[in-house]
Amino acid sequence: MLSHVPAEWKKIFLSSVIVITAFVLILTNETAAQPSPNRQNADPVDNYTIIHAGALLAMPGAAPADQSSIIVKNERIVSIQKGFLSKAAFPMKAGDTLQIVDLSDRFVLPGLMDAHVHLRNQPSLRRRRGPGRAGGMPADFAFNAVLYAQRTLSAGFTTVRDLGSDDQSVFAVRDAINAGRMIGPRILAAGSNLSVTGGHGDPTANADLAERMRLGVCDGPQECRRAVRTQHKLGADVIKYMSTGGFSSQTGLAQQMFLEEMKAIVDAAHQLDMKVTTHAYDPDAIKDAIRAGVDSIEHGFLLDDEGVQMMKAQGVWLVPTLSASMPPPIFGIKNAPSVALRNKYKAFERAAAAGVKIAFGTDAGTFTHAQNAKEFDLMIKFGMSEMDAIYAATVSDAQLFGLEDDIGSIAPGKLADIIAVTGNPLENITALHKVDFVMKSGRIAKQDGVMAAPFTYPPFREQAE
Ligand SMILES: [Zn+2]
């Protein structure tokens, strides 16, 4: 809608920055007593990695290749070559480093993604404090998010979308990872979920307007636009709003937000170049969200056939979160009402069969973190092929996140987000339960099943210090 306008303004802004920078450089040179050596001509040192992949699924959707070498230069993939390239055959200049990673007996594929996690929490956390203790402070959540982020990366998930943390703790964790202060997946964070007063995402008792905005509570288009802008100002990458009630808040599953409120949210977010997703069960609420221009539907268990056709026509993604609806033995939830609902309406099966775009997302955090890959088992149990399920967690999620130029496949120019497993997940998907090699942005985070010590990532969106 407005895509050409921000692009133009960005160009004008960038050229102003260049002019100002050049001016400052001229001033600096004239006032300097000693001219500094011209560092621009010095060749920077490059760090190369050659990965020997026994089997390589470089582009999910296309058949895997055998015995290949992936050449990684700094944080990005340079090329993929047949066979196992040796060190001797590799041209390097003085100061460059080169390591060979032997995954010749492994199956190598792009880093996995999860479009729906809650990194700050998981069920076991609630049991950790005794009676009379407050708990649940932002710092508690931030420290837990650090741990859960590391476990998530260790499980092979190199990019995740965090869909809701009211205390903004996940922003701090995202920024620390981007600045290279700790190991973790690339995080796109929503901050507080937007909800109407008393709705599924309203955590307030009796807060003033400023506090309500911080916590994403809004009624009417004007407040909802302000709520979007507030989350953006606080640091959100993506907006999530609650179209309907939900299980955890016991607010039912009916529609809670009007179409005009949804439209205000979507338009305000898109103007700020943010994607919008919505938690939705009620089929009419889902259809209003599609009319409002939402980018994806979370859960969607009650999606009806008209909704399926609308999603397909408008290219709206479904994030099925099957994991959050499953009975024992997978997650130990006994008689969860979501199970009966999911199994009755089979929204995932109907949407996938109709050709609706499916993005991989689990709702991890409502169950124990680092079990994200069990979602694959469920997708296959409900009829999807192994290849399509892996496609959903790589190519599709990258598109949903708007990051398809950087991640989603192993291809020249893309960030080197690469994982490896023993066995062939195209034949037995449970191979993805045990990821023993993880590279993110060209740095090895896990090798032979062991996580690396903290290190610095190349800057991603944020400047390193
Ligand atoms: Zn959720």
Image: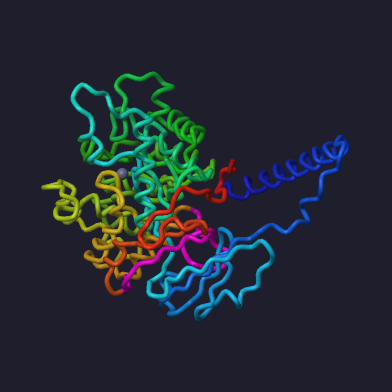
Spot occupied by residue 29 in the image (x, y as percentages of width and height): 85, 40
Residue 123: name its quadrant: top left
Specify the quadrant that holds the C terminus. top right
**Of helix, strand and loop, which mostly describes the magenta segment?**
loop
Is 361 or 22 nearer to us in this picture? 22
Is 413 covered by the magenta stretch?
yes
Asked whether the viewer can see residue 267, the reply is no
Q: Residue at x 55, y 69 (%)?
A: 71
Residue 405 appears left or right of 450: right
Spot occupied by residue 288 in the image (x, y as percentages of width and height): 35, 45
Asked whether the viewer can see residue 101, the reply is yes
Q: Bounds of the magenta span?
A: 402-426
Q: What colour scheme does the image use?
A: rainbow
Spot occupied by residue 92 in the image (x, y as percentages of width and height): 66, 69
Is 390 or 119 nearer to us in this picture? 119
Is 73 or 242 nearer to us in this picture? 73
Is 438 or 14 nearer to us in this picture? 438
Q: Residue at x 37, y 30 (%)?
A: 138
Is 422 covered by the magenta stretch?
yes
Spot occupied by residue 210 in the image (x, y as percentages of width and height): 44, 22
Q: Is residue 117 above or below residue 87?
A: above
Residue 339 appears left or right of 4: left
In the image as oriented, which residue stretches furthest toward the left?
335
